[in-house]
Amino acid sequence: MKSRFLLILISCVALTAARSQDITTADGQVHRSSSLRRAGSTIMIKVTTPEGGLIEVGIPAATIVKISFPKPPELAKAQAAGSAGNAPEVLLLTGDYVTKEAEFKDLPGSWWPEMARLRLLALAGTGKDADTATLAREIGSLKSPDAESLSRGGTLFANISSGDKEAVIVGAKALPRIGGGPGSALAQLALGRILLVKKDYPGALRAFLTIKVFYPSATLLQPAALFGAAQAYVGLKDEKRTAMTIKDLTESYPSSPLVAEAKKLAETFSKP
C-alpha cells in the first residue's frame, strides 16, 4: 500500500513538472508556474513564496520574451496526418488545443500558431468554408507575415459561403499566385472552386494545378486541388486526364475522404 502511494505521489510530481512553464521577461527574470491564465493584457501565474505558500501574480504580456509552453503531444501526429493529406485526422487532433489555448496564441513560445495553421488547411481542404474563414480571422490577429498571408487566403472562403464570386476572384488576385506566402495556396483553392461554379474550366484547372505544382508542401490542400482538377477535366470533357488525376489522388492520398467522391466522379465517363 505504501509503495503504491509512493508511485502515485511520484507520478503527480512528474506530471506537475511536465506542465510547469518558465516565463522569461525582458528584464531577464525567469518565473516558473504550473498555472497560467489571462486577464486582458496581463498573464496571471502562481508562484511559491519563501514561506512555501502559493500566490498569484500578474505579468504584463508585453514584457514576456518567451514562455516554455509544453509541446502538445498531438502536434507530431497532426503533422504526420497533414503530410499524408489526412484532413479529418488533423481536425480531430487539433480541435481541442486550438480552442483551449486560443487565449495564449500571441505569446512567444506558444504552439497555437502551428496547430491553428494545420487546422486551417484541413478545414479548407474538407470544404468547411465558414469555419475556415472564422479561424483565418483569428489567425489574422497575430502579428507576423505568415499569419497575415494565411488570414487573407482563408477569409476568402467566407465569400464562397455567401456566393460572392467576384470577391473571391478579386481577393485571390491580390495575393501572389506563385512564390507567395502560405495563404496563396488557400487563395488558389478558393479561386478554383469559384471558377468551377462559373464553368470557367480552364481557369479553375489553372488554379488547382498551381497548388499541385507550386505549393507541394501544402499537402492538406492537395486532395482538394486534385479533386477540383478532375472536376475541371470533366467539364472540359477530357476523359484521359480525368482518369489520370483521379488515379493520382487515390494513390497519393488514400486516406482522404475525397477518394470516394473521386471514384464517383470517374463514373461520369464510364456510363454508356
Image: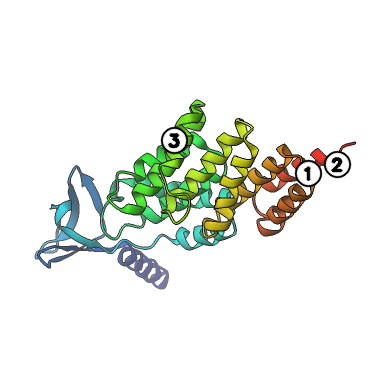
Mark 1–mark 2 contact, CB under 8 Å? yes
Considering the numbered disc 3 on the image, is that residue within a helix, a strand or a loop? helix
From the image, state whether disc 3 or disc 2 is nearer to you. 3
Decide if residue 125 is on the left or right side of residue 134: right
Outermost residue, bottom side: 3
Residue positioned 43% across, 38% down in the render: 171
Q: Amino acid at mark 1?
A: Ala
| Circle 2 Cα neighbour tier, 10 Å, few/some/many (<14 / 14–19 / ≥20) | few
Q: Which residue is mark 1?
A: 266
Image coordinates for residue 155, horizontal then vertical, percent:
42, 38
| Residue 66 visible to an observer of this rendering | yes
From the image, state whether disc 1 or disc 3 is nearer to you. 3
Residue positioned 52% across, 48% down in the render: 122
Looking at the image, is mark 1 or mark 3 earlier in the sequence?
A: 3
Report the quarter where the C terminus lies.
top right
Decide if residue 87 is on the left or right side of residue 141: right
| Residue 101 visible to an observer of this rendering | no
Front one among 86 and 246: 246
Please say if 113 is above or below 237.
Answer: below
Considering the numbered disc 2 on the image, is that residue within a helix, a strand or a loop? helix
Q: Amino acid at mark 2?
A: Ser
| Circle 1 Cα neighbour tier, 10 Å, few/some/many (<14 / 14–19 / ≥20) | many
Residue positioned 55% across, 51% down in the render: 210
Front one among 5 and 146: 146
Measure how far apart labels 1 and 3 are at the Cα level. 32 Å
Q: Which residue is mark 3?
A: 170
| Circle 3 Cα neighbour tier, 10 Å, few/some/many (<14 / 14–19 / ≥20) | few
Please say if 142 is above or below 169.
Answer: below
Image coordinates for residue 131, horizontal then vertical, percent:
47, 37
Considering the numbered disc 1 on the image, is that residue within a helix, a strand or a loop? helix
Q: Which residue is mark 2?
A: 270
